[in-house]
Image (cartoon, helix red, strand yellow):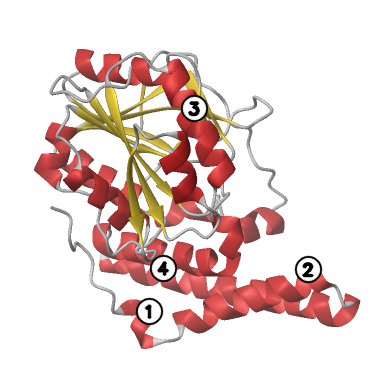
Amino acid sequence: MFVDNPSILTTIVIVNWNTRELLYNCLKTILDTTSTTYQIWVVDNASTDGSAEMVNSSFPQVNLIANPKNDGFAAANNLAIRQAQPTEYVLLLNPDTEVKPGSLDALVAFLQQNPTVGATGVQLLNPDGTNQRSYDYFYNFFASFWRNLLVKKLFHLTPGTVEQPDRDALEVDWIIGACLMLRNEALREVGLLDESFFMYGEEVDLQQRLRKRGWKIMLLPKVSIVHYGGQSSKQASLKMMIQEYRSRYLLIRKHNSFFTLVMYLIKALVGLIFWAGYWGAKWVVRRDEAARQSFKAYLAVLTRHLKPEFYQTPVGVKTN
């Protein structure tokens, strides 16, 4: 139920970059399937595909912020949260999602019934209905080895299937940020998203801060939405790959020990050197264009790691 009055329960924030058709579908499914009271804020990060114009013409009830430049995911979410009318809950929702009937209502009801929960989310589904990974664990250096692609290849390990736990609620380390509902009280206590994360890692950092303050993070495995995944990122895959490595470094630097940080960097550099060499050799031998592109990507990320400015970004800025 879309309303504009003091009884609004939830602020829905959607940050968009050049995903007009998916954004249209996302907004329509929210309007068609959600009965709890809410306000919607779309922050368009300087799209060139007519996204902002579409929102203005097709969804006049939606609050639109048309950014003249792309300042990143965290900054865009914070901008909307600061400008929005304060509500009990804040939902961070990706534009490449389809909301299923009752899913957002279930998140609101769960937070209302569980006052110690600071954040909750749903089971993410692929378009074919199969499960996506919807939660993950905070970084642990030794555990990360068994999830590393190079290690899996060396030891012939196969990826595990994404299982849906047979329970109504599951306490987890952190929830994938495609659909993350937050208690505003908890946000006021720990601050908003850290804007030093341009993209990737900002929701992990926020949930680590919530956990450190005693708030629970709970996934609702029997509630689901469809998530197409990576629709903005694939439009600038190299830049996003660099951002992913940068955010991982910032996250570990902020929350882990110096020893863990050093060991992570050694592992990252070894991995980058290996994959740059692997794809480079494949390109030289087979003259494969895909191998050439992969070689260039890993080489670019490796080069960034060798520049001092990669390690000089401050963390913990503009979170209030």
Look at mark 2 in the image and give the residue it sits on: 290
Disc 3 crowd, CA 10 A, few/some/many (<14, 14-19, 20+): some
Kindly state the secondary structure of the residue where label 2 is placed.
helix
Residue 297 seen anywhere in this rendered image of the structure: yes
Q: Which mark is residue 186?
A: none
Tag 4 and tag 1, C-beta contact below 8 Å = yes
Q: CA distance from mark 1 to mark 3?
A: 40 Å
Give, as a three-letter code, the residue at label 2: Ala
Kindly state the secondary structure of the residue where label 3 is placed.
helix
Question: Which-is-in-front pick, marks 2 and 3?
Answer: 3
Kindly state the secondary structure of the residue where label 1 is placed.
helix
Residue 267's spot in the image, x, y percent?
Answer: 49, 69
- Mark 1 or mark 3, which has the lower sequence index? 3
- Mark 4 or mark 1, which has the lower sequence index? 4
- Mark 3 or mark 4, which has the lower sequence index? 3
Q: CA distance from mark 2 to mark 1?
A: 27 Å
Q: Which mark is residue 310?
A: 1
Residue 202's spot in the image, x, y percent?
Answer: 33, 53
- Mark 2 or mark 3, which has the lower sequence index? 3
Tag 2 and tag 3, C-beta contact below 8 Å = no
Disc 4 crowd, CA 10 A, few/some/many (<14, 14-19, 20+): many
Q: Which mark is residue 28?
A: 3
Residue 139 seen anywhere in this rendered image of the structure: no
Look at mark 4 in the image and give the residue it sits on: 246
* 29 or 93, nearer to the observer: 29
Kindly state the secondary structure of the residue where label 4 is placed.
helix
Is residue 99 shown left or right of residue 9? right
Q: CA distance from mark 4 to mark 1?
A: 7 Å
Give, as a three-letter code, the residue at label 4: Arg
